[in-house]
Amino acid sequence: MDYVVVIEKLDDGSFSAHVPDLPGCVTSGDSVDEVRILIKEAVTMHIDPLRRHEETVPAPATTIHIIHAA
């Protein structure tokens, strides 16, 4: 499954990431590359227990559309 990940630069220069379709699946780090690695691990850690307990894994539902401002 492919989930949308939102990565944001914070005021202190660090970065945070969250997955809108997996509430509570968040991470932060010092660089975009670090956050990409950490959020991938966070998604796995979020989904694996759901599967082990035979609970519903939320399907990806968020889409992305980028608007380029003039």
Image: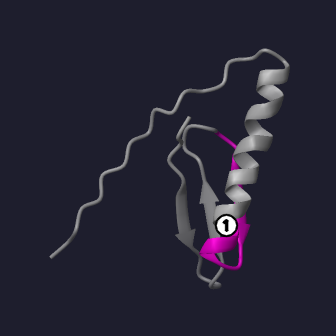
In this view, 56 is above or below 1: above
Q: Position of residue 17 (x, y in %)?
A: 62, 60
Name the residue furthest front: 1
The count of marks equals: 1
**Circle 1 residue:** 35
Write the residue at 51% across / 33% down: 60
Quadrant assignment for the N terminus: top right
Magenta includes 24? yes
Badge 1 marks a residue whose secondary structure is helix
User: Relative to residue 35, is residue 50 depicted above or below?
Assistant: above
**Closest to the observer, 36 or 27:** 36
Residue 57 drawn at (x, y percent) = 66, 24
Residue 21 lies in quadrant:
top right
Q: Residue at x 55, y 64 (%)?
A: 7
Residue sitting at 53 percent across and 40 percent down? 2
What's the amino acid at mark 1? Val
Where is residue 24 drawn, in percent x and y? 70, 44
Tell me: 19 left or right of 39: left
Q: Position of residue 58 (x, y in %)?
A: 60, 27
Instruction: Give the extent of the magenta segment.
Output: 23-34
Q: Residue at x 70, y 71 (%)?
A: 34
In this rendering, position of residue 54 left or right of residue 19: right
Q: Which quadrant would residue 31 be assigned to in this image?
A: bottom right
Q: As drawn, is 35 to the left or to the right of 41?
A: left
Task: Give the farthest residue toward the bottom.
Answer: 13
Which of 23/59 is in front? 59
Q: If the image is split into quadrants, where does the C terminus sit?
A: bottom left
